[in-house]
Amino acid sequence: ILSAGRRWLFVPVIHRTWKPYVFSVSPKEHRHCHRSRAFTSTPSSTSESDISNDTNERVLIKDLGQGIYNVQLNRPKKCNALDMHMFESIGETISKLQSSNSNSGNDDNYPNNVRCIILSGNGRAFCTGLDVPSIIKPGDGGDNSTILPHTKIRRLLERPSGYDKREQMEGVGEGGDNDNGINHSNVAIGNLAQDVSYLWRVIPVPVIAVMHGMCYGAGLQIGLGADIRITHETCKLSIMEAKWGLIPDMCASITLRELISIDVAKELTFTGRIIDGVEAKEIGLVTKCIRSGEDNDSHRNDTKNSESIQDELMEEALKLAKVMVQRSPDAIAAAKSLYQRTWIDSKEEQCLDLESKLQKKLLPSWNQFVASSKNFGLKLSYIKQKNLDV
């Protein structure tokens, strides 16, 4: 039984072979202590460049060229299950990428001209969800200190997480809700558990999730935070929180309503049923489902076959990303902001007003001129994305 403030989590620990991951977090530094592997600037190339190969790092960043970066969850032995180290690493990675296009380029640890992100998982699964044993057991915090379970849960639930670069909104927190006409697109509102999914929506570039193997619970919710999801027919997906007596609380109440009908969302949530990539595409949960055309039933867990599927999905994602980076970065960012701010429960006059405001930002701009010139055979270069806050 775990307590975090007024929240209680009942988890029966009955499997003696469970071994929690021991992560190096100091209680004094748990908010921002985990850094993803340092980004090393590399010459622009169409070939893949590994930014990190340290297997102890929870998140790897690979330069695929043309401003396209592969952000890879990196805990393959645990099927990329989420421990506290993984939560913090994803949060910090998104935080850095969130401001990468607007910084002065002085931070050599991260790229400063990101045009598209491909989110994937290392190993045989995208992400199998929360690593419950690592959360419910005390972990070594380093310096002879120990982080207790209730401390971990409190960290996951405290709002804001500290990773959202946007302005902190007064009155929004535990139990707080303050509208006051404030533009919610410019404020930090999520906790750490939510932000590892929600903040992919905030980054002003396309985010493509490549989902293979297994995408369960928290893993599925991370994928739902992306703009586009590409999966394989053999992939297994599930809103699995019901099996733990919980609800999907990592931004699912926002992402699911944009993709599927409420009755389908309820059925999947109430049952925790596992579906395959084909059904996920049929109900609208994913954007594309790749069919291999081969009978892989007897080899679906084979490592070589898993790698082949990942390569196939990455190839499809990269092909899509290369088309997107040919468009104006300002237009892409504006379109992403427009749809996410108006798609659900917005008045028509608000939608039309936001369209006009964003368009006025785009019209007198160099990047709009470059995009138009491509239609006449001119080859000009885009400049860094402009501020489109309205």
Image (cartoon, helix red, strand yellow):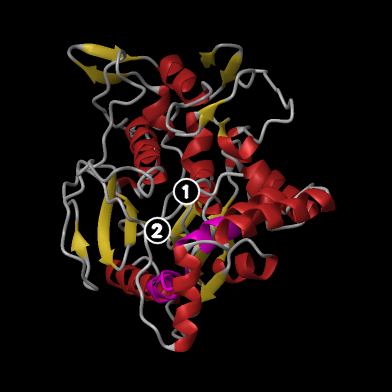
Between residues 215 and 53, which one lies in front from this camera angle? 53
Name the spot of residue 47 as percent of width and height, x first: 21, 72
Q: Residue at x 23, y 41 (%)?
A: 107
Q: Is residue 149 above or below residue 338?
A: above
Q: Is residue 332 magenta?
A: yes
Between residues 27 and 329, which one lies in front from this camera angle? 329
Which disc, if any, is residue 203?
A: 1
Q: Residue at x 75, y 48 (%)?
A: 266
Which disc, if any, is residue 108?
A: none
Name the spot of residue 311 as percent of width and height, x first: 33, 73
What is the secondary structure assignment of the residue under circle 1? loop
Would residue 150 be found to the left or right of residue 23 on screen? Answer: right
Label 2: which residue?
117
Q: Does residue 12 appear anywhere in the picture?
A: no
Q: Residue at x 52, y 29 (%)?
A: 167
* Kind of residue sitting beneath label 1: Ile
